[in-house]
Amino acid sequence: MAKNFDSNYPSVDDLRNKAKSRIPRFAFEYLDGGCNEDVSLARNTNDIRKVQLEPRYLQNYGTSSTMTKVLGMEFDAPFGIAPVGLQGLMWPNSPAILAKAAYKHNIPFILSTVTTMDIEKASELTEGNAWFQLYNPVDDAIRDDIINRAQAAGCPVLVLLCDVPTFGFRPRDFKNGLALPPKMSVANILQILGKPTWAFNTLKYGQPTFENLKPYTPEGLNLKQLGAFMDKTFSGRLNAEKIKPIRDKWKGKLVLKGVASERDTKDAIKMGFDGIILSNHGGRQLDAAQSTIGTLQDVADKYGNQIEIMLDSGLRSGPDIARVMASGAKFTFMGRSFMYGVGALGAKGGDHTIGMLKTQFQQVMDQLCCESVADLPKHLIT
């Protein structure tokens, strides 16, 4: 077991429960919820856990390695930290905590355009290893400047988000005032007063803001005006015409996140992407969506030798990671799980959650008698 493992929290569910007790309700529900009736949110995990794996107890077996290669890079485990917006709202300084932990453990960290730490800081904390997720702006000048900043920071991978042609319909966020434009109600203020550790750290690290977007945001906007600016700036859809200049400009690996069908996978290959992340935004965009594992099973056999296929949405444990890798993914990402870890344990949460997931995944590999991550598909029960 990892040195930084806290035995009081041996699972993501334990971390979630502790985080819920430490984070104001409006911020926790922003992290925890899906859209509409949370159907896709539940379906993602439920469908992953239908996958069964077969151990090979009597075969010759040495030791298991969790080392994994994706996009020409080698990592210590087949999972990374997915991009999450407004991380500092959920737990102060959380993007910095997670970026440092990811670098320490040699797993990828993806920074969102709309989180609360900028590209330059993420690059500093990861020595140029942070990936960057781009919400494609309507304004080409803003788009080009953000890409230039990511390249100057040394980001090896640009992740282009395609599943937000409109923001998801999230009832709890509307009630809590976290839809655009945001508001701070008396109820929210009372919730803050009931979570003193969160409140103290927010005072320490400052009110969360969209750090990446500060150079492009007019000064002096009130909350309503800021909401209108965000909605206008990131209201564009993606298509081949909009993707081509990004592919031409970006010199590193280019990944499309939010792919949810064979059709979009085929188009991504034609457009020159190096990889895709099968995702339904953690069930936060379309409540009638197919589960991510369902999409994976449709596309892996057909396109797995043409493009690197990764997956997020719904994973909550080491066995979940093994199930997804056995089903044909080359890599996985998790968002909420790491935020639960930081919400539960603060500055120790990144180390704990990564170490816990590594231990869980290693145990599955050993139990299957599977020596390499690449061999996991041999253990899939179809």
Image: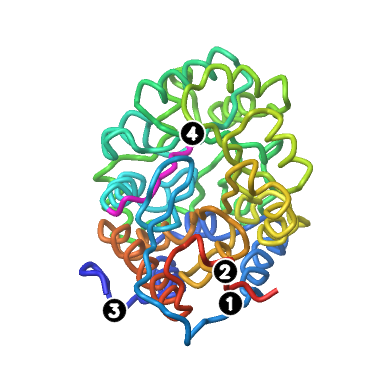
Amino acid identity at mark 4: Thr
Q: Residue at left 47%, top 16%?
A: 145
Question: In the image, residue 112 lies at what x, y percent?
Answer: 48, 38
Q: Nearer the viewer, mark 3 or mark 2?
A: 2
| Residue annotated with mark 4 | 113
Q: Is mark 1 on a helix, strand or loop?
A: loop
| Residue annotated with mark 2 | 323
Q: In this view, does 158 lie above or below 15?
A: above
Q: Are marks 3 and 2 in contact (CB under 8 Å)?
A: no
Question: Which residue extends farthest bottom?
Answer: 58
Residues packed near mark 1 inside 10 Å, few (<14), some (14 to 19) or many (20 plus): many
Q: Is mark 3 on a helix, strand or loop?
A: loop
Q: Earlier in the sequence, mark 1 or mark 3?
A: 3
Residues under labels 4 and 2: Cα distance?
30 Å
Amino acid identity at mark 3: Ser
Q: Residue at left 32%, top 53%?
A: 199
Quadrant for residue 379, please give it: bottom right
Q: Do the residues labelled 1 and 3 touch (CB within 8 Å)?
A: no
Q: Give the range drawn in magenta.
A: 105-114
Residues under labels 3 and 2: Cα distance?
24 Å
Which dot marks residue 252?
none
Which dot marks residue 7?
3
Amino acid identity at mark 1: Leu
Q: Do the residues labelled 2 and 1 touch (CB within 8 Å)?
A: yes
Q: Is mark 2 on a helix, strand or loop?
A: helix
Image quadrant in which the C terminus is located: bottom right
Q: Which of marks 1 and 4 is nearer the N terminus?
A: 1
Residues under labels 2 and 1: Cα distance?
7 Å
